[in-house]
Amino acid sequence: MIDISKLTAQKAHMIDREIEKVFPKNGLKNLDDAVWYHLGTGGKRLRPILSIVTYEALGGKDQKILPFAASCEILHNWLLIHDDIEDGDEVRRDKPAVWKKYGLAHGINVGDYMAQKVFELILSSDVDNEKKFHLIDSMVKTSIRTAEGQTMDINLRENNSPEEKDYLDMVTDKTAHYLTVCMVGAAVVAEREEIIPKLIKFGSEIGPAFQIADDILDLTVGKGRKEIGRDVKEGKRSILAIHCLGKCSDGEAEKLLKILNKLPEDTTDEEVSEVKRLFEKHGSIDYAREKAEKMKQEALETVKTLPEELHEILEFFADYLISRKR
């Protein structure tokens, strides 16, 4: 049985050591220190660890994957920094968000800075130029699709008749691609490009399942922001909201949309609780859990013919992403 705590203990220091090569800890004030502040707020380094263990399962026995794995962590974190700004989130992992601690201008600049370091790390990789091009191309496409997904998310908050397909299209772009790229890069470095289509399909199924699980977490235990239901306050059309709108009465739908369409700072905790009661009444939370589990099973079916060690790793990560408590 794979132990995520043990994996983190074994691999995280390798990733941070690689990251330190491009972000000096005694670097420019309000830039490098802000990067390390954000990285120090927490996070399990899941994406780079997934990249490393995928590479090892494909026969990689050296450290050639480390720069790319570190670039996956930087990609994830600069997206979080900008996501906090776009959503107006003042807290990240129970600490002030970068933009809140350092100011909005620095927050935007720190994210921009980190985005370029993704490619600097890849260029430093000990792989041939053809592989570097493939890795950079994958990251470029991932960044574009993620930005498109974020736009779809923002646009969807203005839609009072959202459909489940709208949500799934959005989360596939916003969440799936930058989870998938971690595995794709490992296959490139390991010279196992023939399995990339299956990894992409796996990611396109487990990514939305992960986001659905994230939506449920936000409404039940929170996501490191010291509040429950932040997504409700931001008016996000989660799969729970979409399912509920399709099941509730006209009066309940009007009430739900009125709450979702309020500004975050004007939405009370009691209103969040009212939304949660509606979700529970109409089975929306259970529906979301069942949907995530179904998508997880479909994802695992996609990769069942991959090498046994890799299949075991992907099964573990799929289970962890869907069933995690935080």
Image: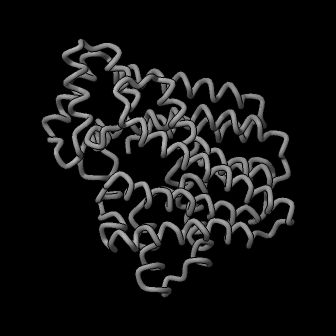
- Residue sitting at x 22%, y 39%: 262
- Residue sitting at x 58%, y 44%: 2
Residue 179, compared with residue 170, is above or below; it is below
295 to the left or right of 233: right
Count all numbered tags in the image, as a single digit: 0
State the image coordinates of residue 135 (x, y, percent, origin top left). 75, 57
201 to the left or right of 221: right
State the image coordinates of residue 270 (x, y, percent, origin top left). 13, 36
Residue 225, compared with residue 16, is above or below; it is above
State the image coordinates of residue 62 (x, y, percent, origin top left). 78, 64
State the image coordinates of residue 189 (x, y, percent, origin top left). 80, 56
- Point out the image quarter for the C terminus: top left
Residue 30, compared with residue 76, is above or below; it is below
Q: Quadrant of residue 249?
A: top left
- Point out the image quarter for the N terminus: top right
Question: What scheme was used to colour the molecule?
Answer: one colour
242 to the left or right of 266: right
Residue 323, compared with residue 72, is above or below; it is above
Is residue 253 at least partly visible in the picture? yes
- Residue sitting at x 61%, y 50%: 144
- Residue sitting at x 56%, y 28%: 296
Is residue 52 at least partly visible in the picture? no
